Amino acid sequence: MVVLVALSAGIYAAVLIPFKGLVLIPGITEIRPANTLPPVLGLLFGPAGAWGSAFGNLIGDFFGTLGIGSIFGFIGNFMQAYIPYRLWRNLGLLKADDLEPNLNSGRKIFAYTVVALLGSFACALTIGWGLDLLKMVPFAALASIIAVNNSIPSIVLGIPLLMILYPRVKKWNLLWTDIMEEDEIQKPDAKARIAALITSLAILVGLFGGLMAAVAGGQSLFAAGFAGGKAGLASVGFIAGFSAIIFILASLL
Amino acid sequence: MEMFLYMDKDSILHKLDPRTKIFIMLISFAIALMFSSLSLLLILSFLVILYGALGKVLSNLKRIRVILIMIAIMSVILWALTYPGTTRLWGPVTKEGIIYGIAIGIKFDVMIIAGMIFLSSTKIEEISLGLVKLGIPYRPAFAFSTAVRLVPMIVSTSYIITQAQKSRGLDLDTGNILQRIRKYIPLLIPVLISVIRQANILAMALESKGFGYSDKRTSYLEIKFEVRDYAFLAVALLILIVAVYFKFKYRL
């Protein structure tokens, strides 16, 4: 497990670092094709992939953007890998007898798209809320930019990447289901399904509810968000913050 | 190719306990976050630069200058165009927007420089040990330090694969930026596969050395607080207290 954490982190950081100069929001985020990796790492390596994404992002920050935002970046990137891992088996999008992340059917590609989007939104919600709370960047601007910046590569490049990597990782017995002890692997039962549904709902409510509250409070989406309204709105803090706590707790159940 | 920022110098900063440097870095983040006033952020920048000069690591600023300049320029452009100011200079650009943009640019840059000073004066194994001493479990700390060491290896692997493909006729030097990125994407696969293959070898190496045998570990590297650590921490805390006082007393 420790090796897979290090490996995932190393790969993620190595792809992140060359793009550090392509700044999107000064000091906060840049163009990140590396965001293809967290959902793929999460589905292949499970919790090790999630920790790897978190550490990889932190190491990436070491090459120029280490700051207070790195704390929320750590949690957000963990979640971008952890949420797909948790929801893949438990959300009920797949047949119970075939839960392998091999994307060999339209149904699995659809399930991947859903969990990768939810992972990207979870990351956007966590980082957007955290930096809005610190009054660094308005929620509407940051969360919308991160959501798009994460979603596009994780779907467009993530699907072919997972299709190519899965058979090799499976062959080398490095899938998280091969590494973890049998009793550590959660069964996709009713409790897991409910937790997955709460997680998904909290992510969607937190992100889109937070965005609506932010816009109602005078903020604007994307780059225009820097013009309209200041960071730190109480309504955004409540909706996004409460939902973030709920989805994090539910995802750990 | 030297990827990491660490510089091996004989300075008081290098001799500080990594925990002291972590606390000082966090304190500088906190103070930077507290203020958006240009003059106060300039004072903080001066103090951070002075701290870096003590460690003789400011030459690393050259290595991150592109990022610092990009952040400063983007911040000024972004805020000049969007900040709701009253003194219009040209189109949507306002004087207040430019000043705010400069202040925010400095705020982010000063945090990045504080991070750079920490990384330039602290070895990876010291960071790892510092985190363990601060209560982080050994396994995550080990995974972190191993990952940091893996990055140059992965970059080197990707360089070798790129050169191999070029020697077979792959043209990576022509086309616009998007076309070039598209050409690089297929190279990602052999890099990832090559790196993942090495995971098994690394796992066996760790196992053969008894990794995870005991939760209590000893370390070849020893760190402890000394008088200089307390002195640096006292000064940093004093600056933080003064900053908090000014923040609340004068609403800065």
Image (tube, helix red, strand yellow):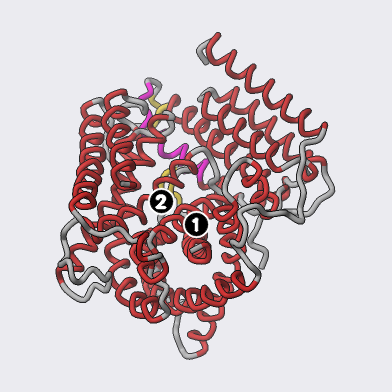
Predominant secondary structure, magenta span: helix
Identify the image quadrant of the N terminus of chain B. bottom right
**Alpha carbon distance from label 2 to label 1:** 9 Å
For the residues labelled 2 and 1, say whether their Cβ atoms are less than 8 Å apart: yes
Q: Is residue A92 above or below residue B119?
A: below
Chain of the residue displaying label 2: A
Left of A199 or right of it: where is A142? right
Which residue type does callout 2 highlight?
A: Asn
Say which residue label 1 marks.
A56
Give the structural element (helix, strand or loop) at label 2.
Answer: helix
On the image, which quarter does residue A234 sit in? Answer: top left
Q: Does the magenta stretch include residue A180?
A: no
Q: Give the range drawn in magenta.
A: B71-85
Residue A136, quarter of the rendered image: top left
Instruction: Please report the residue visible at 45 percent of the width from the left and 50 percent of the height from the top.
Output: A23
Q: Name the residue under label 2.
A: A77
> Which of the two residues, B216 or A127, is positioned nearer the viewer here?
B216
Residue B14, how many percent across, how many down?
78, 45
What chain does mark 1 sit on? A
Residue B123 in percent (x, y) is at 70, 53
Between A104 and A134, the one lying in front of the other is: A104
Q: Does the magenta stretch include residue B84?
A: yes
Q: Where is residue A62 in the image (x, y as percent from the top left)?
A: 57, 51
Q: Can residue A18 be seen in this view?
A: no
Residue B224, given in percent of the width and then of the height, sits at 77, 40
* Above-or-below relation of B53 to B243: below
A5 relative to A54, above or below = below
